[in-house]
Amino acid sequence: MKKNIAIIMGGYSSEADISIKSGNVVFNHLNKDKFDVYRILISKEKWAYIDKNEQEHPINMGDFTTTVNGYKIRFDTVFNAIHGHPGEDGTILAYFDLLGINHSSAPFYQMAVAFNKRDCLSLLKPYGIKTARSVYLNKGDEVSFSSIVKQVGLPCFVKPNRAGSSFGISKVYKEEDLENALEKAFQEDHEILIEQFLNGIEVSVGVIRWKGEILVLPVTEIDSDNDFFDYEAKYLGESREITPARISKIQQDNVTRMAHKIYKTMDLKGLSRADFIFIEDEPHFIELNMVPGLSAESILPKQAKEAGISLSDLFESTLV
């Protein structure tokens, strides 16, 4: 008997449209001979099952079921394709745990920590994970721009603490530009991370659970046309993502070992992608993506392809 798989997509953040694209890719590639697959749109306005005719059927939030032509549909497993809140930060996963429904992601606590950049950095530093110098701010805090510059230097990055796809990020070269950068970041989150600029090769490393073991995928080098790997570079073709990365054997070994250590230390499951910048041969951890882009042109699927793993098998691996 085939399992019913609900692919949740959309969400409540600026990444909703990107999430819908990812969700549709998963829908198109999951093996329909093995699974009955349902697209579930999650938004602030509605939760709805979208059928093959693009008709909407409301989701009962009490038990996460839907009724079509008088027949109630229950789901065995949820594939989480929501970038940002409430999928990538773990919020909706706690709801599925309460209902006893399996899902494709790591446990909700690990998802919440991974999504919170400063909490993730704080957790990993004691394990010897190298990172950039950083300053944290909450909305309403008294701000000393000169103190920030003294701690992290210039240029620096101003980031929303809990956001993805480079929304709200600025690279700041002059102290007088910090105020506008903070305002931009605070539009995405009330917590801000200000980081030292690291001048080196940027790479991204996918890590998954494959056949019961942690598998580090081939490393991707990020070569951006822009000042940094921003939204346009990620989604509008203004960068080159080179897999396998043009790095030395020492760099390859170091970043592979660090990516594996992060995944194991945090007791993760499902798909993940960790970003690093090399200072000489040492990778410095930037952030962790627990619901990475999932189109055929996204980084992690390209890495899986390089490793000989199809999209169908990649997505199915999260459902066990």
Image (tube, helix red, strand yellow):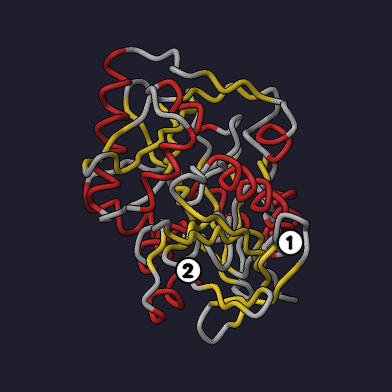
- Kindly indicate whether the residue at mark 1 contacts the one at mark 2 (C-beta within 8 angstroms): no
Circle 2 or circle 1, nearest the eye: 2
In which quarter of the view is residue 185 placed? bottom right
State the residue position of label 1.
Answer: 183
Identify the secondary structure beneath mark 1. helix
Which dot marks residue 75? 2
Residue type at tag 1:
Glu
> How much space separates mark 2 and mark 1, taking CA atoms?
42 Å
Identify the secondary structure beneath mark 2. loop
Identify whether 310 is placed above or below 196: above
- The residue located at (69%, 22%) in the rendering is 225
Identify whether 212 is placed above or below 266: above
Frontmost residue, 286 versus 151:
286
- The residue located at (42%, 41%) in the rendering is 274
Q: Is residue 48 left or right of residue 62?
A: right
In which quarter of the view is residue 76 placed? bottom left
Crowd tier of the residue under label 1, counting other residues whose Cα lies within 10 Å: few below 14, some 14–19, many 20 or above: few
- The residue located at (55%, 58%) in the rendering is 7
Whole-percent x and y of residue 311?
49, 34
